[in-house]
């Protein structure tokens, strides 16, 4: 399975070291300490057994920021953000480190034992943690001189993001390029879906980076959520929603109506 990034993260970085603010829409299980397995090996995926999934912690920031930067380097939205490949390779690790910090304090980051992949999940909705006061400054420091593109990216995704209903946002799912095609991304995706289905009963939302990743997410139970997102004079991204499987059909219908 490919890296299947769900698009680039939407307004991700809060202050480093900010306290965690679990709201009622936050899936149980997030309190497990970094390094403790979330799942064990189970079933078989393409290329071998399903790898165990664990929660990442601050010690993983440097490694995972580089993993995500490498996984996202050639995507069309990434090329739109920073056209020059060398500059993109230089800027992306610092940018994704901010996103990882946000997910670790406001949500959860799942990884695998060798840290070759990461999934960043952030609860969203009425009770979710908002954008920090110093977001613009931190974004400018990480992305200068391309900050204007990153702000335009934020604005485009903000206009489409579901409002007023609790859900969990898959901001990033990335697998190191040499580990793609082995089911690692699927293992990360399934681990959090199991939490949502078993405990949270909440929808998942993402922005697929292209049609190929959209097709993969369709296979994993996601459906289109409105029309594609057009980045200004740039590529399309595809907003998608997955409903939890543990609820009755009437409850799922009600939740889907809330997301529209």
Image: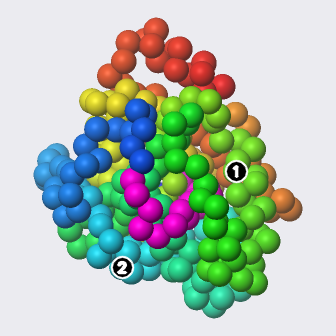
Expressed as whole percent of the image width and height from the top left, the position of residue 67 reads: 41, 75
Report whether 113 appears left or right of 131: left
Q: Above or below — where is 32 with respect to 128?
A: below
Is tag 1's residue or tag 2's residue first in the polypeptide sequence? 2
Q: Which mark is residue 157?
A: 1
- Residue at (25% x, 49% y) in the render: 31
Whether residue 192 is visible, yes or no, is: yes
| Residue ranking furthest to the right | 233
Expressed as whole percent of the image width and height from the top left, the position of residue 218 reads: 50, 39
Q: Which mark is residue 63?
A: 2
Expressed as whole percent of the image width and height from the top left, the position of residue 143 reads: 67, 79
Q: Quadrant of the C terminus?
A: top right
Part of the protein shown in magenta: 5-20
Q: Above or below — where is 119 with respect to 81?
A: above
- Residue at (28% x, 38% y) in the render: 28
User: Count of labels shown?
Assistant: 2
Give the CA distance from mark 1 to mark 2.
Answer: 27 Å
Q: Above or below — where is 222 with respect to 229?
A: above
Q: Quadrant of residue 27?
A: top left
6 within the magenta span: yes
Q: Quadrant of the N terminus?
A: bottom left
226 within the magenta span: no
Expressed as whole percent of the image width and height from the top left, the position of residue 149 reads: 77, 70
- Which secondary structure is most common in the magenta stretch? loop
Could you say whether the residue bearing mark 1 is in a helix, strand or loop? helix
- Residue at (68% x, 74% y) in the render: 137
Q: Quadrant of residue 72?
A: bottom right
Of residue 47 and residue 39, the one placed in the foreground of this image is 39
Classed neighbour count for the residue bearing mark 1: other residues with Cα under 10 Å, few (<14), some (14–19), many (≥20): many
């Amino acid at each position: 399975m490919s890296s299947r990034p769900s698009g680039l993260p939407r307004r991700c970085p809060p202050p480093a070291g900010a306290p965690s603010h679990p709201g009622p829409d936050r899936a149980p299980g997030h309190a497990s300490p970094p390094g403790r397995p979330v799942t064990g090996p189970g079933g078989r995926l393409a290329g071998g057994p399903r790898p165990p999934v664990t929660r990442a912690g601050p010690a993983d920031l440097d490694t995972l920021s580089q993993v995500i930067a490498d996984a996202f380097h050639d995507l069309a939205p990434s090329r739109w953000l920073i056209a020059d490949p060398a500059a993109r390779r230089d800027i992306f690790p610092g940018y994704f480190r901010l996103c990882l910090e946000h997910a670790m304090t406001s949500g959860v980051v799942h990884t695998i034992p060798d840290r070759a992949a990461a999934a960043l999940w952030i609860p969203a909705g009425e009770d979710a943690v908002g954008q920090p006061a110093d977001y613009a400054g931190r974004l400018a420091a990480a992305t200068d001189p391309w900050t204007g593109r990153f702000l335009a990216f934020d604005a485009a995704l903000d206009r489409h993001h579901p409002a007023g209903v609790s859900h969990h946002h898959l901001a990033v799912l990335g697998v190191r390029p040499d580990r793609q095609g082995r089911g690692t991304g699927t293992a990360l995706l399934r681990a959090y879906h199991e939490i949502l289905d078993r405990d949270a009963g909440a929808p998942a939302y993402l922005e697929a980076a292209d049609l190929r990743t959209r097709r993969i997410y369709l296979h994993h139970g996601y459906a289109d959520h409105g029309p594609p997102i057009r980045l200004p004079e740039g590529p399309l991204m595809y907003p998608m929603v997955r409903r939890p499987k543990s609820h009755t059909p009437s409850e799922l219908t009600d939740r889907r109506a809330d997301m529209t």
